[in-house]
């Protein structure tokens, strides 16, 4: 699941990761889109990340919990040039943990790092917040293809580690599971788009 407010570039991050594409005019998600990516893990394993990209406009907000409750992980995205989007991430975390539980794996992406001159949220603030919620932190740019793969791979590795611990705890000392997540392991929710200028991603 990818969470964040407005045009923070969540869909662009996903498309950069899954399809290695980027568009300056990426349109906001309407209803839902589903994407998957098979990734190799360190111990000769593999993982399939199943991603729901769901619209988060107010008229769709009530549907959020349907997606949250089956989520294994969330990538929380804010725009470094928009302090409101950073504040909204904090609200997403509270809502997410209420529905999905405190064990959900989290990563925080400070997106649009290519717009450093317009930065409104310092990197230290982002890192400090991520640490406070037990999340990994990444400085990302879908446009420059910076930090994107690392962010998603951190989630894949975290989920794979949980699967390994779960299998070991259950007495299953046999083959380690290599598939990350259920049919809905990652999802994306997009907030109502605020009218504003500047780059989209």
Image (spheres, rainbow, N blue to C red):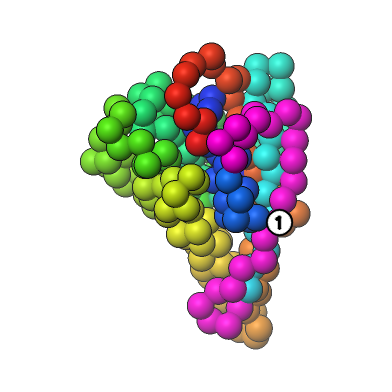
Residue 60: say if magenta: no
In the rendering, at what x and y percent does residue 34 appear?
A: 74, 46
Relative side of 81 to 194, left or right: left
Where, by quadrant of the figure, is residue 170 drawn? bottom right
Q: Between residue 32 and residue 63, name the one nearer to us.
A: 32
- Residue drawn at (71%, 22%) of the image: 60
Q: How many marks?
A: 1
- Residue drawn at (63%, 73%) of the image: 46
Q: Between residue 168 and residue 57, name the one nearer to us.
A: 57
Relative side of 197 to 29, left or right: left
Q: Between residue 42 and residue 81, name the one nearer to us.
A: 81
- Residue drawn at (48%, 45%) of the image: 143
Position of the N terminus by quadrant = top right
Q: Residue furthest bottom?
A: 174
Q: Is residue 99 visible?
A: no
Q: Residue furthest front?
A: 24
In the rendering, at what x and y percent does residue 22 appear?
A: 58, 45
Q: Is residue 43 above or below residue 165?
A: below
In the rendering, at what x and y percent does residue 97 appear?
A: 52, 38
Where, by quadrant of the figure, is residue 58 drawn? top right
Mark 1, residue position: 36
Element under disc 1:
strand
By secondary structure, the bulk of the magenta-drawn segment is best described as: loop
In the rendering, at what x and y percent does residue 67 appear?
A: 69, 38
Q: Residue furthest top?
A: 195
Q: Between residue 169 and residue 45, name the one nearer to us.
A: 45
Q: Which residues are magenta?
A: 23-45
Q: Is residue 23 above or below residue 177?
A: above
Circle 1 packing at 10 Å, graded few (<14), some (14-19), many (20+), is some
Q: Is residue 194 visible?
A: yes
- Residue drawn at (35%, 24%) of the image: 83
Residue 42: say if magenta: yes
């Amino acid at each position: 699941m990818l969470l964040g407010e407005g045009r923070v570039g969540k869909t662009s991050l996903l498309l950069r990761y899954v399809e290695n594409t980027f568009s300056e005019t990426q349109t906001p998600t309407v209803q839902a889109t589903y994407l998957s990516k098979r990734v190799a893990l360190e111990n000769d394993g593999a993982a399939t990340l199943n991603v729901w990209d769901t619209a988060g406009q107010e008229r769709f907000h009530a549907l959020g919990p349907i997606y949250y409750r089956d989520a294994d992980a969330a990538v929380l995205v804010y725009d470094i040039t928009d302090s409101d989007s950073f504040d909204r991430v904090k609200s997403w975390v509270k809502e997410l943990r209420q529905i999905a539980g405190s064990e959900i794996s989290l990563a925080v992406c400070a997106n649009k790092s290519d717009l450093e001159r317009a930065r409104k949220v310092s990197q230290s603030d982002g890192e400090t917040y991520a640490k406070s919620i037990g999340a990994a932190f990444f400085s990302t740019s879908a446009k420059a293809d910076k930090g994107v793969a690392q962010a998603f791979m951190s989630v894949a590795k975290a989920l794979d580690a949980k699967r390994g611990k779960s299998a070991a705890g259950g007495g299953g000392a046999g083959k380690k599971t290599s598939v990350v997540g259920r049919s809905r392991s990652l999802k994306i929710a997009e907030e109502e788009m605020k009218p504003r200028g500047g780059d989209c991603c």
